[in-house]
């Protein structure tokens, strides 16, 4: 009889689990907006919005979503841009010159994005607050040791103040990615807003004949400053002259550029076999000539010593 | 010549002269032509729309066309086995089978070439192969050896035919005018003089010697198309020998089927005897055992090691989606024919015919298994591809073209047997005189 309450408990748990499962199955697709702010080389600024649809615990990029972006408040005078997301669910814009005064007036700003999954739906809002900031990058080459220094400043009361405790990545730009300059993935700014890392990339292929490479200091997805990036070109790379081997004979070369040993072997074999074939074709003509030399009456038997059949 | 000899010679000649199609022959030919026409229509659709009409995709880029190509190349190897190897070994019992073997070789190699052009999609790409072809590529080697083998096979068909052409021209009333004109065009110069016979015999001997390495090359190079590609199931140094053994088997199986059909419908029991079936049966069983050995080698060793990339491919063959076809090909293509042909009763014409059919059908599916499952198991995972790319089943156009090509090969053999003697008349007379 004691077992009965346990069975009841079990049934209740099963019922609850089934109910949760049912609710989970009926989850309504939800539009999600993600807003990011980028500053490149302390001058170019742009905003990026990402629209995604959350359904069945999966996020899918949403194409063709109309998004309105505002600076500080939702009003027509503060409108930054009206955007439509692409097939990757993303859209981006710069801040228009008309909002320059508004931008310069405050050290901190709020970006507001409004979007609707359907025209009848309530708009979805995404907000992003950022403080104005900048990075400075510098290099030092002392006693053969090369190092890169980056300083982070935030704008406050009309002055640039060193920002402490900000995570900064220092790297060399490569085609399709960045290569960290030393052992550490990232550095954190000290009380002077400064980070420094030793440049340990020897013989890094340069981007031009002068041996230039591009160094970059980057702040990524910072809650206060957003995304900042600054570049500096330095002659610390090594120029490798590209030698074009396209015209050389090799197994991977283009037509008529096969290795000589292969050409010799292949053409010898093909030549020998086709030589035999041509010889045999000539034999047909020889037999023809021999046959044409003999005139045999239609029904007359040929002497057996001359003919085989 | 004695009177009895003349009678015997005339009887052999009359028995072996090409015969008109009977009702069954006409139905057979009509069915083949119909299949060919359906294939031609499917090819027209492919030319019009492109390879999109096929079910091939990014992964299975070689489908039923290439399986068919490998099958044709394989069956064509029989010309060198029956004609060249046995002739050079001074084996005379195979004389009635030489022309059957040679015409199978020629028809198969013709359609092997055509099916490759079909697989290219746009036929002008074949021309590109010559103007942009690279000597380093096994594909160009294949084109060279197929062309060479075709010409040699044609010559090996032609030279022994010359004495028969003279016989055919002597029996002009037996054939329609256009056929007589064809005989004249091909062999009116043949008078059978000592000089001509000497040249002809020498040419046949040279051809028999030349065709063996070329035949080995054609199938080895075809195997290299696979083996030089780093893929599960193809990454083998044994592929050349494995392909050649399989080719000899399917070729011999094809000859057995053709022997039975020609014997039955042209009433050639006197020339293709039970002794021929018995001896061909011994050859087939030996070749089947050899091919089975290579199969064990090709599957057991990778299965024993079970390297990660091979695992999915082998598991799929042994117990997955392809398991029914795989075990069908092994059982029907090798093991059951071996069991039938090991016994004397199994080497009688009808059981031999059944075993031959099994070998040929099993061999066709074996080629499908060599091509497709490997392509469905690439080393890199299959990502971001449409669902249909994960499986392959040929479209109706692919089936129609493949079946049309098989029907086309059979049609060449059928028309050849209608126009020329399928058993060499002259050689049979000589053999008969020697026996007497």
Image: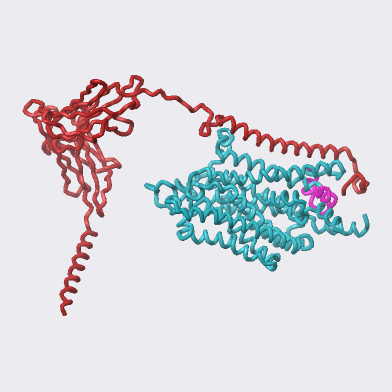
Q: Position of residue B346 (x, y in %)?
A: 67, 67
- Examine the image and state in which quarter residue B311 appears: bottom left
In which quadrant is the N terminus of chain A drawn? bottom left
Choose between B182 and B201: the one closer to the eye: B201
Q: How is the image coloured?
A: by chain
- Total labels: the figure holds 0
Q: Is residue B74 above or below residue A283?
A: below
- A52 or A7: nearer the viewer: A7
Is residue A241 positioned above or below A81 on the image?
Answer: above
Residue A31: where, in percent of width, then height? 21, 48
Task: Look at the image and tell me whether residue A99 can be seen.
Answer: no
Q: Which chain is red?
A: A
Horizontal relation, residue B387 to residue B206: left or right: left
View extreme (bottom): residue: A1
Horizontal relation, residue A132 to residue B61: left or right: left
Magenta residue span:
B163-185
Q: Position of residue B267 (x, y in %)?
A: 76, 62
Q: Is residue A223 left or right of residue B25?
A: left
Above-or-below relation of A2 to B283: below
The main secondary structure of the magenta stretch is helix
Instruction: Say which residue appears at 24% left-offset and 50% top-offset.
Output: A54
The location of residue A122, given as percent across then percent down, is 16, 48
In the displayed orientation, state which residue is furthest to the front. A143
Chain the render paints cyan: B
Asked if residue A131 is among those painted magenta in the image, a careful observer would answer no
Location of residue B17 by image quarter: bottom right
User: Magenta segment: does it hold B164?
Assistant: yes
- Left or right: where B335 falls relative to A69: right
């Amino acid at each position: 009889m004691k077992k009965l309450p346990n069975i009841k408990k079990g049934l209740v748990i099963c019922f609850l689990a089934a109910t949760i499962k049912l609710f989970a199955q009926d989850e309504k697709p939800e539009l999600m907006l993600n807003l990011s702010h980028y500053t490149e080389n302390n001058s170019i600024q742009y905003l990026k919005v990402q629209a995604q649809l959350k359904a069945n615990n999966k996020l899918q990029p949403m194409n063709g979503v109309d998004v309105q972006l505002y600076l500080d408040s939702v009003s027509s005078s503060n409108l930054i841009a009206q955007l439509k997301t692409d097939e990757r669910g993303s859209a981006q814009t710069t801040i228009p010159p008309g909002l320059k005064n508004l931008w310069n007036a405050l050290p901190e700003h709020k970006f507001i994005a409004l979007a609707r999954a359907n025209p009848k739906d309530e708009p979805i809002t995404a907000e992003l607050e950022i403080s104005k900031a900048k990075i400075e990058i510098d290099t030092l080459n002392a006693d053969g040791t090369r190092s890169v220094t980056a300083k982070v400043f935030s704008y406050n009361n009309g002055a640039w103040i060193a920002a402490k405790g900000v995570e900064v990545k220092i790297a060399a730009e490569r085609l399709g990615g960045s290569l960290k300059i030393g052992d550490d993935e990232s550095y954190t700014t000290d009380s002077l807003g400064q980070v420094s890392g030793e440049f340990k990339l020897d013989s890094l292929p340069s981007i031009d004949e002068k041996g230039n490479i591009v160094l970059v200091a980057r702040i990524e997805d910072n809650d206060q400053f957003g995304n900042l990036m600054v570049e500096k070109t330095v002659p610390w790379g090594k120029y490798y002259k590209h030698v074009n081997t396209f015209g050389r004979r090799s197994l991977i070369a283009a037509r008529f550029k096969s290795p000589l040993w292969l050409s010799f072997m292949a053409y010898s074999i093909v030549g020998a076999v086709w030589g035999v074939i041509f010889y045999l074709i000539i034999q047909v003509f020889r037999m023809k000539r021999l046959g044409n030399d003999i005139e045999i009456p239609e029904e007359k038997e040929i002497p057996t010593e001359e003919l085989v059949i | 010549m004695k009177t009895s000899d003349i009678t015997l010679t005339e009887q052999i000649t009359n028995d072996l002269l090409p015969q008109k199609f009977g009702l069954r022959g006409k139905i057979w030919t009509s069915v083949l032509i119909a299949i060919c026409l359906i294939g031609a229509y499917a090819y027209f659709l492919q030319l019009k729309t492109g390879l999109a009409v096929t079910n091939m995709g990014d992964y299975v880029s070689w489908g039923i066309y290439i399986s068919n190509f490998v099958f044709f190349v394989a069956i064509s190897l029989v010309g060198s086995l029956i004609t060249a190897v046995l002739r050079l070994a001074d084996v005379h019992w195979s004389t009635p089978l030489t022309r059957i073997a040679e015409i199978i070789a020629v028809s198969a190699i013709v359609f092997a070439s055509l099916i490759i052009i079909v697989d290219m999609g746009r036929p002008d790409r074949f021309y590109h192969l010559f103007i942009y072809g690279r000597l380093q590529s096994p594909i160009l080697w294949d084109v060279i050896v197929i062309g060479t083998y075709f010409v040699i096979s044609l010559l090996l068909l032609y030279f022994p035919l010359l004495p028969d052409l003279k016989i055919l021209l002597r029996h002009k009333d037996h054939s329609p005018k256009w056929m007589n004109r064809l005989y004249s065009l091909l062999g009116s110069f043949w008078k059978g003089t000592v000089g001509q016979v000497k040249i002809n015999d020498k040419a046949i001997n040279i051809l028999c010697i030349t065709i063996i390495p070329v035949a080995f090359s054609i199938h080895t190079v075809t195997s290299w198309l696979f083996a030089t590609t780093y893929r599960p199931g193809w990454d083998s140094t044994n592929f050349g020998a494995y392909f050649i053994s399989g080719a000899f088997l399917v070729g011999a199986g094809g000859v057995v089927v053709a022997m039975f059909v020609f014997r039955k419908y042209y009433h050639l029991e006197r020339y293709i005897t039970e002794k021929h079936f018995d001896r061909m049966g011994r050859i087939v069983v030996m070749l089947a055992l050899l091919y089975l050995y290579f199969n064990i080698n090709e599957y057991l060793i990778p299965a024993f090691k079970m390297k990660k990339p091979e695992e999915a491919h082998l598991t799929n063959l042994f117990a997955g989606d392809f398991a029914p076809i795989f075990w069908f090909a092994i059982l029907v293509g090798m093991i059951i024919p071996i069991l039938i042909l090991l016994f004397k009763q199994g080497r009688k014409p009808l059981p031999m015919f059944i075993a031959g059919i099994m070998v040929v059908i099993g061999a066709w599916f074996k080629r499908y298994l060599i091509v497709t499952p490997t392509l469905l198991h690439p080393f890199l995972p299959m990502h971001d591809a449409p669902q249909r790319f994960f499986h392959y089943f040929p479209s109706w156009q692919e089936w129609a073209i493949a079946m049309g090509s098989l029907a086309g090969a059979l049609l060449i053999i059928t028309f050849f047997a209608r126009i020329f003697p399928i058993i060499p008349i002259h050689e049979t007379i000589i053999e008969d005189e020697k026996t007497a």
